[in-house]
Image (tube, coloured by chain):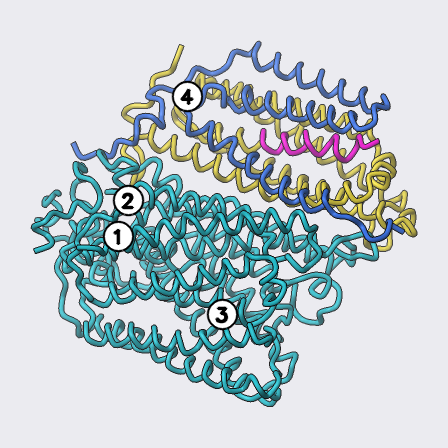
Amino acid sequence: MGVPVPDPVSRPLTRPAPPAVATLVGAWLALLALLALTVTLAHVPLGAWNAALALAIAIAKALLIVLVFMHVRHASRLTQVFSALGFVWLMVLFSLLMSDALTRTPLSPWP
Amino acid sequence: MTTAALERPQPSYLAAGDTLRSWLLTTDHKRIAWLYLVTITLFFAIGGAAATLIRLELLTPQGDLVSDETYNKLFTLHGVIMVWFFLIPSVPAVLGNFLVPLMIGARDLAFPRLNLLSWYIFILGGAFTLWAMVSGGVDTGWTFYTPFSTMFSNTHVVLTAVGVFVTGFSSILTGLNFIVTLHTLRAPGMTWMRLPLFLWSLYATSLVMVLATPVLAITLVLIAVERIARVGIFDPALGGDPLLFQHLFWFYSHPAVYIMILPGMGVTSEIVAAFSRRRVFGYGFVAVASLAIALLGFLVWGHHMFVAGESFYANLVFSFLSFMVAIPSAVKVFNWTATLYKGSIALDTPMLYALAFIALFTIGGLTGLYLASLPVDVHVTDTYFVVAHFHTIMVGGMVTAYLGGLHYWWPKMTGRRYPETWGRVAAVTLFLGFALTFFPQFALGYLGMPRRYHVYPPEFQVLNVLSSAGASILAIGYALPLVYLIASLRGGPTAGPNPWGARGLEWTVPSPPPPGNFATIPRVTEEAYAYTDADRE
Amino acid sequence: MPIASEAGASARVPFADPAQQHEAASAAMWVFLSTEVMLFGGVFAAYLWYRHADPAAFARGSALLDAPLGTVNTAVLLTSSLAMALAVRAAALGRRRPALGWLAGTAVLGLAFLAIKLLSWRHEWTRGLVPALHAGAALAAQPRVELFFVVYFIATGLHALHVLAGVGALAVTGAALARVRDPGRWNPIELTGLYWHFVDIVWVFLFPILYLVR
């Protein structure tokens, strides 16, 4: 004995099987479909919903890429946490940042 | 506790190769720690020289030593060098690099070559910054506020920004290395809850390094783009908002102060445990408090902008969160104090530094609460009260902890003991010099003396003279260890593996350790700081 | 069917076995990607701030961009991600030549993305939409639309730099894959894949917020 063995929770003892071609192509087609959807919706005047829907579709695409292409769906818990970390932290930046912008009471309207 | 590592005599890491090449191309984490140690000491001297000139100028109310533009360049140099080239790397890159593998029972960090690369990146960033300083300096303050930095300053803003940008990657690589190492290379039996608290602090620090520094990087890019291309990102004429710069800058720079202080807290935990011969009280709480400080530290940045034009509601939120971040820090102070209670206290040099840290960090932290309070901040913002607050934490806290850690682990790193009496003299000198330098500044700030001014009303002179006098004593407090630590390398008595009788894997290997650290990787069976009553005899 | 972890292959100090080394490398890549997320995050933050300040100006600016070209480019990059995923899959199954083929395809699509981007920038230049370099004639007297274009060029410029670096990484990966003894147990291609998919994700967000603001 004398070899360091890492915490067994953090790594699976076997690597997950590579995804099937059908899975990958299916994800790709879904991505293209979402692209078509977001472009189409941009031409439909929905007021504030345009931005919200565009964002939701972008998030859906990102999730497809992360979970399927980047294989996070079958990764260790550690990997899953790390993969979410950056995005979660970005939300912290955005929410506190915009808490200032959204609560400003302008003294005079923009010129 | 394994003794296998003590049996076979092997060359120490210091003796394994003595060519310049073997040092400059090393991937041994212990040698890289020394590369950083030498480098940051040089930078500390440069930043200290700037501080000396500042305090000399401030002896008199008139601006008679340097011009106002030179003065601006001096405090900018002081801030940039001390923050990015001394404080941020100090404990992580020197003590962390040396100790992380030893403390977890590993042979090296996860990525030894990335570790060396981080030092070279540090050197490169330092070179850019020094080049900027030598060719005329920068006068914006280390905070680079726009639109002055982007539109009006005639100094080397972009060059300095490049230097800091590059250095940021050194920080990121160190943090990345520590995070992955702590997750994957702990020895068998070394569970998270058996880690020394120093490593919990470094883990939290590393998370902050990795998540905050990139925002600094992009902010510096935006400054450079605005300045070079003359486009307005922060220019009000184009609808830009200078406050956006401040938001982005402080989103990094507030967590940066936690990058600076968390490792010092970690050092304090180690020293307090070793020199009271007791397990740190409330180990779990202290461990979680490190993570809480890191998390909450990301949520308070707006307290630097209370009077800058932030909305009232944002001010309230940031003020409240700033009060919250004091809680985990206080938890640590309570736990250290409780550890001391009924401990078998030994007032060796490291312990003197650690006690000074606890006292001064508490004072500095409390003054931070004054600043977090909106009405008080309106009065003391941009005055010497703020200067005194952050220096109390950074110098009274962080530099003190760094020196304490250096003394504590010096025997392990060098195989030599420093002269204990001189060590105690230096620690006390530092504490007294610090107090005389910075306590008058709290008064100055409260009385209304603004920061970054080299002229002031004559009624402030007495306090300024006291502060400058204190700075000269502080300088002695720094010079003493420099002299006797270097002297000990040749003439000091040799140290055994565990001169302090402390617990921890680093004390089970020879002093100095062999290149691979452990003859066989240990198996950990006991909790951290497993001191017994016998240890306290 | 799961693949058994590598045995018998050597790992470099300080790792005890290749599986541990692979896990560490993977964790490191994700930590690195988190730093990239925060880097781009600063640009997104500036975008958020200014779009909120003047949504109409951003809509006007966005309308001046070539949305069809941007759509094509998005499809190109999404397809490159498919090619990358297929390359990683082929490598994991030990099929060297298909893996190299898919890697090459990814690189070609990446270069195509860059070419289209350069084309669109040049187009913006001739239409007077570049804020700096005296090329912003069409934006004069519209300061906040000019600000949109400042954000647009910084965002797409930073992204294009990352795509370029990615193509370089693909080339290095391909060269290494061509020479490695046992491609089925060779992991770095996964890491390159992670980086490439990340660059794709950034564009997935950039595209609607830049091109589809109405």
Q: Where is residue B511 in the image (x, y as percent from the top left)?
A: 17, 58
Q: The blue chain is which one?
A: A
Query: Magenta region, mostly helix, strand or loop?
Result: helix
Residue where numbered disc 2 is placed: B282
Q: How crowded is mark 2: few (under 14 residues within 10 Å), some or many (20 or more)?
A: some
Residue depicted at x 50% and y 58%: B369
Report x, y in % for residue B435.
39, 74
Q: Mark 2 lies on which chain?
A: B
Of callouts 1 and 3, which one flags the residue occurring earlier in the amino acid sequence? 1
Question: Which chain gets the cyan colouring?
Answer: B
Report the residue marked by disc 4.
C184
Calculate the distance from the C-alpha at mark 1 to the C-alpha at mark 3: 28 Å
How far, Cα to Cα, is label 2 from label 4?
48 Å
Write down the residue under mark 3.
B388
Image coordinates of residue B223 in percent, x first then y, are 68, 57
Q: Do labels 1 and 2 touch, CB within 8 Å? A: yes
Residue B60: quadrant of the picture: bottom right
